[in-house]
Image (cartoon, rainbow, N blue to C red):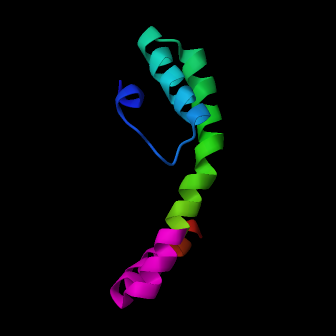
Amino acid sequence: MFAMNKSLPWFDDATMQLIRNLENAFKLKSSEACIALCKEIEMKISPLVTETIERFKQKGREMSATFRFWLNFLEAGDILTSC
């Protein structure tokens, strides 16, 4: 079991318990429990992941012109494909 064997320092104990519960729900093949737990986990970790990605992009922009170029390129591609 991943959650039992790994320490994920950016997750608090309550989130780790949700992940363990999700693993158990998968084992029991309980689709309703899996869906509910996935939604709850997503609500808890999405802001953390988004914040981490934004910090990574900001640091990358500051540290590397090449990083800045490719990030701008990807963002331009997102804009073009969303039209």
Q: Is residue 81 visible?
A: no
Q: Is residue 14 above or below residue 58?
A: above
Q: Quadrant of residue 64?
A: bottom left
- x 52%, y 62%: residue: 52
Q: Residue 81, image x and y in percent? A: 51, 68
Q: Is residue 57 above or below residue 6?
A: below
Q: Residue furthest top?
A: 28
Our reading of the magenta stretch's main secondary structure is: helix
6 drawn magenta: no
Q: Which residues are magenta?
A: 55-77
- x 61%, y 32%: residue: 14
Left or right? Give the position of 79 relative to 36.
Answer: left
- x 54%, y 54%: residue: 49
Q: Residue 65, image x and y in percent? A: 37, 90
Q: How many marks?
A: 0
Quadrant for the N terminus in the image: top left
- x 63%, y 53%: residue: 47
74 drawn magenta: yes
The residue closer to the viewer here, 32 or 46, is 46
Q: Is residue 33 visible?
A: yes
Quadrant for the C terminus in the image: bottom right
Q: Is residue 31 above or below residue 52?
A: above
Q: Residue furthest bottom?
A: 65
